[in-house]
Image (cartoon, grey):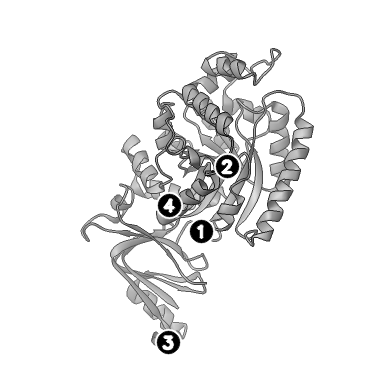
Amino acid sequence: MELYLAAHILPVTGPVVSGGGAVAARDGRIVAVGAEDEVRRELAAQGVAPATIREHDFSDSVLLPGLVNVHTHLELSWLKDEDLPGGDYVAWLRRLLELRDSRGETADAEGAARQAIETMVSRGTVAVGDVSNTLSTVGPLADSSLRGVIFHEIYRIRPEGAEQRMEEVAAQVAAADQELQRLGARDRFFIAPTPHGPHTTSPALLKALAGRAAASREPLSVHVAESRPEVELLQDGGGDLAGFYKERDFMDGDWQPPAMSPVAHLDRLGVLSPATLAVHCVHVDRQDLARLQERRCTVVTCPRSNARLGVGCAPVPTIMGAGIPVALGTDSLASVPDLDLFAEMAALRSDHSKLSAAAVIRMATLNGAKALGLEQDLGSLAPGKLARMVRVVLPSLSDDPMETVTTCPETVEPVAAAS
C-alpha cells in the first residue's frame, strides 16, 4: 500500500482537501482520497496493517491528477529551434512546409519526438492526443509512460481519389496498430484517422473519416476556425490562404467554397458529434457555438500557439457559457517553446482573467481525459482510477494551491504508484 501525504489534494471532482490530505493506492490504483486521518481510518477498516504502508511525504506540496494534453504534433518537434515566423499564420505555414519539403523527415525527428515526450512527462502530463501525418511517433509513444490516442491526420482538398485515400489510410492504421501490439502498447494507445480541417480536406474525405470514426466509436480531432484566412477561404474563396493554396497547387480551378463558416461546413457534412474534438475555435460566432453545443462537441484550446501565430484569442468563457466543454492542448513545438500544460493554464488565465483556477485545472485534467475517452482511468483523483498524479511544490505553505497550479509553478514532479 502506498500513502501519499500532501498539504493540499485537488481531486477535481470533489472539494479541495487542505490542512493535510492523503491519497492511498494499491497496485497502481487509488483506493482512498481525503483528509489524512480519514484515509488512515479507512485503511485500518480495510484491514491494512500500518507496517505494510509505504508513506511519501509531500507536506510542502499540492497533489493533483496527471495532466492530459489533448492536442499536440510530436512529429514536428524537430522544428523547435527553427526560425519560424510569428504573428502571421500563412507566413508561418509557408515556412513550415518549406522546411519539411527541403529536409523531409530529418534524422533527428525521432530523437526530437522522444525528447519532447520526456520533457512533457517531466512536467506532469500522463496522456496525450498526438496528431501525426506519418505515424512516426508510434515507437516513441509506445516506449513512454503515456497513454492516449494517436490521431492519423489526413488532408487533401482536391475532390478526386477519396476512396483510394481511405483504402491507404486503412492499411496505414492496420500497420501502425500491429506495431503498437508488437511494442506492447496496444493497451495504452490506439490509432484514430482524422481530418486536418475543413479548409484542407475535401467533403468526400471529411464524410468518410467521420463515418469511420462513428462506426469505430473513436474520437475525431479536427482543426476548426483557427485563423481568419481559413474562415475567408471557406466563406468566399478569397484571402491569403487561397493565394497560398494556388501557389502550392493544392486545389484545382474548379474548387468552390461552401460559402459558410468552418463549423457550419463540418456540421452540414455530418462531422460534428459527441466524439468530435473541435481544436482552436478562435473565430466562432453564436450560431457556430449553438451547433457545437447541439452536437455535444468538445472544444480544445491552445492559447500560446494562438498567440504566437497571431490568429486571435479563443472566446473560452463564451464557449463555456454556451454549455460546451473545453479541454487544453499545447499544439506543437513549431508554434510554442515547450509542451508544458502548466504554461498553457497560465496563458489561458492571462487571456481570460475571470476564468476560475478550478475551471482551468478541470480543462487540463478531467475534460481532457473525457475528450480522449480516458475518464475511467484518468482525469481526477478517485477510488478505482490510476494513481498517476503530479506534485506541485508550493513556494509558501500560505499560498493558494489552485492559484499556484495555474500560474506556471517552477517545481513540478510526476508521481505514479507502482502497479
Query: Which residue is at the front of the view, 230 or 260?
Result: 230
Label 3 – label 1 distance at C-alpha: 28 Å
Residue at image point 58% right, 29% down: 101
Number of residues whose C-alpha sits closer than 10 Å to that of mark 3, classed few (under 14), some (14–19) or many (20 or more): few
* Comes first in the chain, label 3 or label 1: 3
Q: Nearer the viewer, mark 1 or mark 2?
A: 2
Location of residue 253 in the rendering, given as x and y in whole percent from the top left corner: 69, 12
Tell me whether the residue at label 1 lies in contact with that at label 2, contact meaning CB atoms closer than 8 angstroms: no
**Three-letter code, disc 3:** Ala
Between disc 4 and disc 2, whose residue precedes? 4
Answer with left or right where residue 239 lies relative to residue 67: right
Q: Which numbered disc covers residue 378? A: 1
**As shown in the figure, which amino acid type bears the numbered disc 4?**
Thr
Which mark is first along the chain, 1 or 4? Answer: 4
Q: Name the residue under label 3.
A: 49
Which residue is rendered at x = 42% and y = 26% of the image? 85
Residue in the picture at 57% in, 42% down: 131
**So how many labels did they put on this image?**
4
Residue hosting label 4:
119
Q: Which residue is drawn at 41% across and 56% down?
A: 122
Q: Where the N terminus falls, by quadrant?
A: bottom left
Residue with the mark numbered 2: 131
Q: Is mark 1 on a helix, strand or loop?
A: loop
Q: Distance between the residues labelled 1 and 2?
A: 20 Å
- Camera-near label (4 vs 3) is 4
Q: What element carries label 2?
A: strand
Q: Nearer the viewer, residue 142 or 270?
A: 142
| Three-letter amino acid code of the residue under disc 1 | Leu
Tell me the kind of residue under disc 2.
Answer: Val
